[in-house]
Image: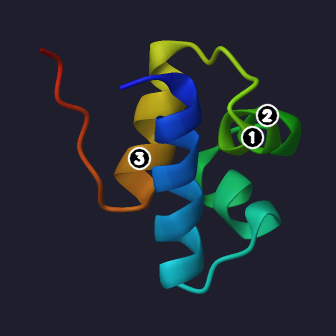
Amino acid sequence: MNLTEIGKQIRDRRKELGIDQSTLSALAGVGINSLVRLERGTGNPRFDVLHNIVSTLGLDIIVR
């Protein structure tokens, strides 16, 4: 899975939960710009940032 696909899954789950980007960034403790870049597939987040976002959304990271 590439960063574009990860960003799409994060965006889709956020919208499914009815959370805007500002709220998600605050809940996950990450910068809004980092979240926006990740959702667009243009970011290269540190693992802890990615983990905080997906955990806040109730998702898991599976490493293969």
Residue drawn at (55%, 50%), measured in percent from left and top? 8
Residue at image point 79% right, 34% down: 37
In the image, which disc is placed on residue 8?
A: none
> Percent from the top left, x then y, of residue 52?
47, 39
Left or right: where 9 falls relative to 22 = left
* Disc 1 secondary structure class: helix
| Residue at the disc numbered 1 | 40
Q: Is there a contact, CB below 8 Å, between mark 1 and mark 3?
A: no
Disc nearest the viewer among 3 and 2:
2
Q: Amino acid at mark 1?
A: Arg
- Around disc 2, counting alpha carbons within 10 Å, would you say few (fewer than 14), some (14 to 19), or many (20 or more)? some
**Quadrant where the N terminus is found in the figure:** top left
Q: Could you tell me the amino acid type at mark 2?
A: Arg
Disc 3 marks a residue whose amino acid type is Val
Disc 2 and disc 1 in contact, CB within 8 angstroms: yes
> Residue 54 bears which disc, if any?
3
CA separation, marks 2 and 1? 5 Å
Relative image position of residue 11 (x, y in whole percent): 59, 59
Distance, label 3 to label 2, CA atoms, is 15 Å
Q: Is residue 36 above or below residue 47?
A: below
In front of the other: 46 or 38: 38
Residue tagged 2: 37
For marks 1 and 3, the one nearer the N-term is 1
**Disc 3 on helix, strand or loop?**
helix
